[in-house]
Image (cartoon, rainbow, N blue to C red):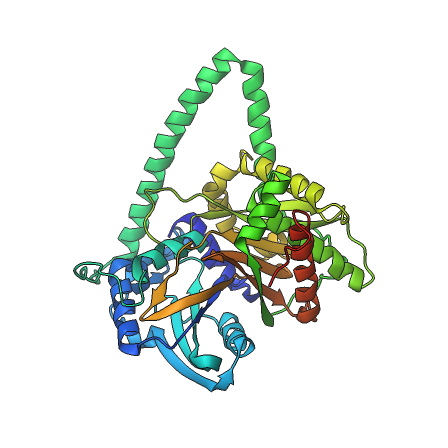
Amino acid sequence: MTQSEFFAWNMEQDPILRSTIVAVVVLDTTPDWERFVTMMDRATHVVPNFRHRPVRARWGIAPPHWVVDPDFDLSWHVRRLALPAPADLDAVLDVARRSAMEAFDTKHPLWHFTLLSGLGDGRAALVLKVHHSLTDGLGGVEIAGEIVDFARGGTDRGPLPDAPRPTEVSALSDTAEWVAETAADLARKGTRTLASALRRAFGSPLRTVLDAGTTCAAVVRFARPVPNTLSPIMTARGLRRRLAAIDVPLEDLHTASRHAGVSVNAAFLAALMLGMRKYHERHRASVERLRVTVPVSLRTESDRLGGNRITLVRLALPVNPADDPVELMRRIGGIVETSRRDPAVPLSNAIAGALNLLPTGYLASVFEHVDVLASNVPGSPIPMFLAGAEIERYYVFGPTLGTALDATLMSHAGTCCVGITADSASVPDLPVMTECLEDGFRAVLASAAPDLTPS
C-alpha cells in the first residue's frame, strides 16, 4: 500500500472513521446475469486490485501489502437479491446504507457488487461496495471505463487477459523491500530538493527562508487537530448512516458556474453551503462558516488502475451571503483555488506516513470536528451499459470519515447525481437536510436563469 492507501486503511481502527465507498447504479432493465458475471470475471483480470487482499507487514513498520487471494471466489463478491416488488429507490438506498455500515472481511478482497431486481417498470439497481484503500473516485471511474459496455449489445474488448497469479511473499522480505525502496526514493527526492534549495538559497536567501517557513506552517495546518465543529448543531457522531439522492441537470449547473466565472466544483460547494445555512435556520441556529474537507486528486497518467491517489484538504467555507449566490460561488472558488496551491499538498503522502504512526485517537481529532466532506467526481458524458442494461443514474455515497455528512457529486450522461451520506447522530432528520440542500441547488441555478431548478 501507498501511505495514502494505508491512511484510509488505518482509520478503520475507529469505526466512525470507516472508509467504505458505496455506489448505487440505477439500470433501465435487469441485466443478463451470465453476461454480468462474465463481465465481472474479466474485471478481475484487467484490474488486479479486484483479486488482492491486504496483509499486514511484520512488526507494523511498513504499510500492509497487497497479495493475490489464493482462495479468490467470484461468487463471494458478486451477488443478486430480489427486492419485494414494486421496489423504489428508497428500498435500494436502504440496502446500500446497511452495506455501508458493515465492515469488510479482510481475508477477502475488499469489494462486493450486489444486483437488485424488483424495481418498478422492470428496472434494477446495482449496489457497489469498495474500500477506499482499493480505489478513490477517479480511480473508480477509470476502472468502470475498462469493464462496462458502450452499447447495449456489448463492446469488443479483445482477448481475456491472464488472471493475476498468487505468489509466495515473505512478510519479512516484503517489509525489508519496502524500507529499501522508501529510503532510495527519499534519497532521490532529497538530493533533487537539496540541489534546488541550494540554487534558490544562493540566488535569494531571504526568499528561501520565507518559503521554508511557509511550507512548515502549511504542513502543521494540514495535519493539526481541530477542537470543535463550526456547526453548533451537527456535533454528535455515531455509527448509523442514512442515504439520500438529489438529481441536478449538469448543463444547468455549468451555466450557473459560467455565469459566476467559477468552476462547477465551486458552484456545487456553494449549493451545499446555501443548503446548510437553510438547515441551520430551520433549527434556529446561526452559522457563518463550516469546516469542509475536500479531496484533491494527485493521480497521474502513470498511476496504475485503482488505488487511492487523493489527499484531503480542510477548508473553512463561508455560508453567507445567502442573498447573493454568485458572490458566494466566487468567494468559495477563490478559497478552493488557493488551497490547491498549498505547499503541503505535494507532501501529503509523507504527511499521511507520519499520521499513520500516530494513535487512532489523534486521527479522530483531525477528522471528527469537520462538518462536511464534499467530493466532485467527473463521470461519463456518454451512456454506459452493464450486460444489456443502460445506466440511468450513478450515485456515489462516500464515507463520512468522522464528519456529519458526506456529499458526493458524480456526473453521468448529463445529470449530476448527488449522493448524500449522513451520520444519523449529527443529522437525525435527513429528509429535512435533503430538502434544504435541494433549495441550495435551486438558488445556485436561479442565479443564472430563474427557471433553472433541480429535478
Check the image and name the residue furthest to the bottom: 84
Determine the residue positioned at 20% across, 62% down: 165
> Is residue 330 shown left or right of residue 390?
right
- Assign the C terminus to one quadrant of the image: bottom right
Considering only vertical position in the picture, is 352 above or below 359? above
**Foreground: 444 or 90?**
444
Check the image and name the residue furthest to the right: 284
* Residue 246 seen from this side: yes
The percent position of residue 29, horizontal first and vertical second, equals: 39, 76
The percent position of residue 332, horizontal first and vertical second, equals: 65, 42
**Foreground: 404 or 32?**
32
Q: Can you tell which quarter of the image residue 168 is in?
A: bottom left
Determine the residue positioned at 63% across, 37% down: 334
Considering only vertical position in the picture, is 30 above or below 12? below
The percent position of residue 312, horizontal first and vertical second, equals: 54, 48
> Is residue 293 shown left or right of residue 87?
right
Determine the residue positioned at 58% across, 54% down: 374
* Residue 357 seen from this side: no
Q: What is the number of callouts on the image?
A: 0
> Is residue 186 shown left or right of residue 333?
left
The percent position of residue 448, horizontal first and vertical second, equals: 65, 47
